[in-house]
């Protein structure tokens, strides 16, 4: 399609390719680990951006979906099936080629579910939960929607912390690497660092492509009309309930994918990922990025999350996000980038008009 | 289960329920006058308890609690003045306060090792603050275009207000963490001590429970009298009805809204003080309290104090009996289950009118 639509994507890709070049030239390749983690968090924020900015539905439970993805993957791939090897289900799975033989750090034999199978299980589970949660929850508006999604996040948090099978407060660790195709693995090994960086940002790029096409399609226009005026768009023939539900499910899938990959990359997941603060952080990134602006969310998210992961904000990590949230809403309610871009565009246009006049 | 245990659980449920009632009433007061929900309400409860704890170090208990309540009320009114009002139009004084806060935050981020040179932090932060504030005030005084930047034409929407109060709750929590640390704090019992107990039908409970129940009842009665018979209460109700109409009758809606924030913060702080001896207080308790209080407020019908009283007590009792069946770790799920059920089945609540669901959405 048009060049205008893809131009930011090309700039983004150039930046993504330049970053490892710069880090390897300056000998600071260790930054790539945080850049990789940033990519997955940004993916969650992008899903939320579509839901909040385009469909106009707030969700303060996005960390819940992130954890549903991450914990499902971690749980299924760390469950040792060796002792159940004779049961019919395990035999069926192994005859379907869904099981992997391996060795743990104690050199014991372990038999676990193949990461691809657990990946699809995680996605299916998050779609399922989003579907049945979304039907009642998306009828709510305003404060009620915020509170209901926030409570969903709290429920996930409580369940994870309270269930011993999911590791409780310790979380799950020793998650094996995810072999996408032979030789390409999502995992924490140091020789795979550059590879993992590109895998992560490729996934983000795919997500961006999905979002760009969605936004510029009939569905995207429907979603935007929904954001502006729900009754109006309903009257114009948009199936608002279905659009909202699909947007909700899509954002849940984005979070779950991010959760699965980050868990495999880190080799572990903990209950800290499910806390309400994480969800609030995603909301604040989308708000600062300008609500209905995927490029703003991408840029702000990448910068803020990277700085936060590098520990720049120190003990004030959460406070910084809270302060940014308040200051942006008070002084630039349309988001930081949107306003500045708007001013710049207006200036350019005025300059051109002045030139043609003279 | 014997009678003893029933009575015991019933009273512990009533105690927790009264705290939820206090938080829910705080939500209701602000909701009634402005139509927004203050997500920082739970944090104000925590701040009230913490302030009373600090004051109690050098003041008797009967003096430290009223001072804590009053200062939390001041904090509430400060929050309205600085943040909520600024959503419409940013004035010079809130702008100065925000600038000062931003300078302090940035300085504490950039100067993490404050111990090396003793006066580095106050000197740098103070100097930067003075320069920044002077620049700001001069720009405000002499540049009309700078001033115009802070006039907003569009009315703030619900989403913005929600996000601002969520941001506030994070900031209050973080500030409390830096002031009071991570440990749980407690206040002395109002009468007796940890071991003194009252017996009823074979069950034993602390006399503090009577204080909690009595003071909560007193707050509910005093509030309903305040809203009915005093001029300030009547003007607040008028503003809740129609802001324009009230201002035509000579009521300043800004003052009424400010008063409602102060009132709800003060009531929340009182709740924090009376519950502190029983449950202890910690910097992170706010979110949970806010969710519970919100559940109660919705359960009873938003903006309805009688409903909140009823809903809070029911929720508290349900929760304390749920411990018998479910593991303790899942206790919160009961509340949230109730919240979701009420939201799906009857969003207007037990006693709320049908219209209250949509009436105040703007």
Image (tube, rainbow, N blue to C red):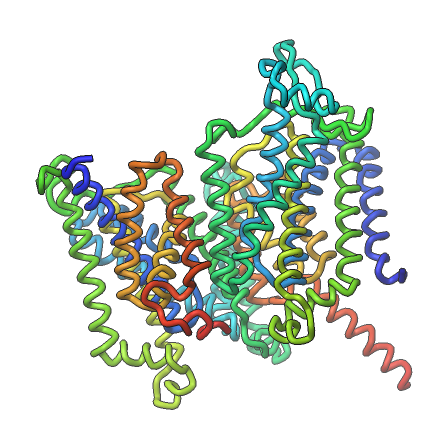
Identity of the residue furthest to the front in this view: A88
Quadrant location of the N terminus of chain A in the rendered image:
bottom right
Image side of residue A255 versus residue A277, left or right: right
Classify residue A71 by image quadrant. top right
Residue at image x 23%, y 71%?
B224
Image side of residue B65 versus residue A127, left or right: left
Whether residue B350 is visible to the viewer of this picture, yes or no, is yes
Whether residue A261 is visible to the viewer of this picture, yes or no, is no
Query: Residue B142, how many percent across, how many down?
Result: 59, 78
Nearer-the-camera pick, B279 or A117: A117
Classify residue A138 by image quadrant. bottom right
Q: How many marks?
A: 0
Nearer-the-camera pick, B15 or B132: B15
Quadrant location of the C terminus of chain A in the rendered image:
bottom right
Residue at image x 61%, y 71%?
A230
Relative height, residue A190 to residue A291 (above, below): above
Relative height, residue A89 to residue B86 (above, below): above
Query: Residue B177, how many percent across, how many down?
Result: 41, 44
Nearer-the-camera pick, B130 or B9: B9
Residue at image x 40%, y 66%?
B348
Nearer-the-camera pick, A228 or A268: A228
Identity of the residue furthest to the bottom in this view: B248
Query: Residue A308, how many percent across, how many down?
Result: 61, 43
Image side of residue A341 versus residue A76, left or right: right
Query: Residue B69, how many percent across, how many down?
Result: 26, 58
């Amino acid at each position: 399609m048009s060049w205008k639509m893809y131009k930011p994507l090309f700039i983004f890709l150039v930046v993504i390719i330049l970053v490892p070049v710069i880090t390897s030239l300056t000998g600071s390749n260790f930054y790539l680990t945080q850049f990789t983690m940033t990519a997955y968090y940004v993916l969650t924020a992008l899903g939320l951006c579509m839901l909040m900015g385009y469909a106009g539905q707030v969700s303060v439970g996005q960390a819940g979906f992130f954890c549903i993805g991450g914990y499902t993957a971690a749980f299924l791939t760390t469950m040792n099936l060796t002792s159940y090897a004779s049961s019919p289900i395990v035999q069926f799975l192994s005859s379907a080629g869904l099981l992997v033989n391996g060795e743990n750090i104690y050199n014991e034999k372990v038999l676990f579910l193949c990461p691809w199978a657990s990946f699809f299980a995680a996605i299916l589970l998050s779609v399922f939960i989003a579907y049945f949660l979304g039907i009642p929850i998306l009828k709510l508006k305003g404060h009620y929607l915020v509170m209901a999604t926030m409570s969903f996040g709290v429920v996930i948090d409580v369940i994870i912390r309270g269930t011993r099978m999911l590791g409780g407060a310790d979380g799950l660790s020793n998650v094996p690497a995810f072999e996408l195709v032979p030789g390409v693995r999502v995992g924490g090994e140091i020789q795979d660092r550059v590879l993992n960086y590109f895998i992560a940002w490729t996934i983000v790029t795919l997500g961006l492509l999905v979002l760009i096409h969605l936004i510029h399609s009939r569905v995207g226009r429907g979603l935007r009309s929904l954001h502006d005026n729900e009754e109006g768009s309903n009257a114009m023939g948009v199936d608002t309930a279905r659009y909202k539900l699909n947007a909700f499910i899509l954002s849940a899938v984005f979070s779950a994918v991010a959760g699965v990959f980050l868990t495999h990359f880190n080799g572990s997941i903990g209950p800290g990922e499910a806390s309400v603060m994480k969800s609030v952080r995603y909301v604040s990134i989308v708000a600062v990025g300008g609500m209905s602006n995927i490029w703003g969310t991408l840029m702000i998210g990448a910068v803020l999350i990277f700085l936060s992961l590098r520990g720049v904000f120190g003990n004030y990590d959460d406070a910084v996000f809270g302060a940014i949230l308040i200051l942006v809403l008070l002084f630039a309610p349309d988001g930081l980038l949107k306003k500045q871009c708007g001013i710049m565009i207006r200036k350019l246009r005025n300059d051109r008009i002045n030139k043609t006049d003279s | 289960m014997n009678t003893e245990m029933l009575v015991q659980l019933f009273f512990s449920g009533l105690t927790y329920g009264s705290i939820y009632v206090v938080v829910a009433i705080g939500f209701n007061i602000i909701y009634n006058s402005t139509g927004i929900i203050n997500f920082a309400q739970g944090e104000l409860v925590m701040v009230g308890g913490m302030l009373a704890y600090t004051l109690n170090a050098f003041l008797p208990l009967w003096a430290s609690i009223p001072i804590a309540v009053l200062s939390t009320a001041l904090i509430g009114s400060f929050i309205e003045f600085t943040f909520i009002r600024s959503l419409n139009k940013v004035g010079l004084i809130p702008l100065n306060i925000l600038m000062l806060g931003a300078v302090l935050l940035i300085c504490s981020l950039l100067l993490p090792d404050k111990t090396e040179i003793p006066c580095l932090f106050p000197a740098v932060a103070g100097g930067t603050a003075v320069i920044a504030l002077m620049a700001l005030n001069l720009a405000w005084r002499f540049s009309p275009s700078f001033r115009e930047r802070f006039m907003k034409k569009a009315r703030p929407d619900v989403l913005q207000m929600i996000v601002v109060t969520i941001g506030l709750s994070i900031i209050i929590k973080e500030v409390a963490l830096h002031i009071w640390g991570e440990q749980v704090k407690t206040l002395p019992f109002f009468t007796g001590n940890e071991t003194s107990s009252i017996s009823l039908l074979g069950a034993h409970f602390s006399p503090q429970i009577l204080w909690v129940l009595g003071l909560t009842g007193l707050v509910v009665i005093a509030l309903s009298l305040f809203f009915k018979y005093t001029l300030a209460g009547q003007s607040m109700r008028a503003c809740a009805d129609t802001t324009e109409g009230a201002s035509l009758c000579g009521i300043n809606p800004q003052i009424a809204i400010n008063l409602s924030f102060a009132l709800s913060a003060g009531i929340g702080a009182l709740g924090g003080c009376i519950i502190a001896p029983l449950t202890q207080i910690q910097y992170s308790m706010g979110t949970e309290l806010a969710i519970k209080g919100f559940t109660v407020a919705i359960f009873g019908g938003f903006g309805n104090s009688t409903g909140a009283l009823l809903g809070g007590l029911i929720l508290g009792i349900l929760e304390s009996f749920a411990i018998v069946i479910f593991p303790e770790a899942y206790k919160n799920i009961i509340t949230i289950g109730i919240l979701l059920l009420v939201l799906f089945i009857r969003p207007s609540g037990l006693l709320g009118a049908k219209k209250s669901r949509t009436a105040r959405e703007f």
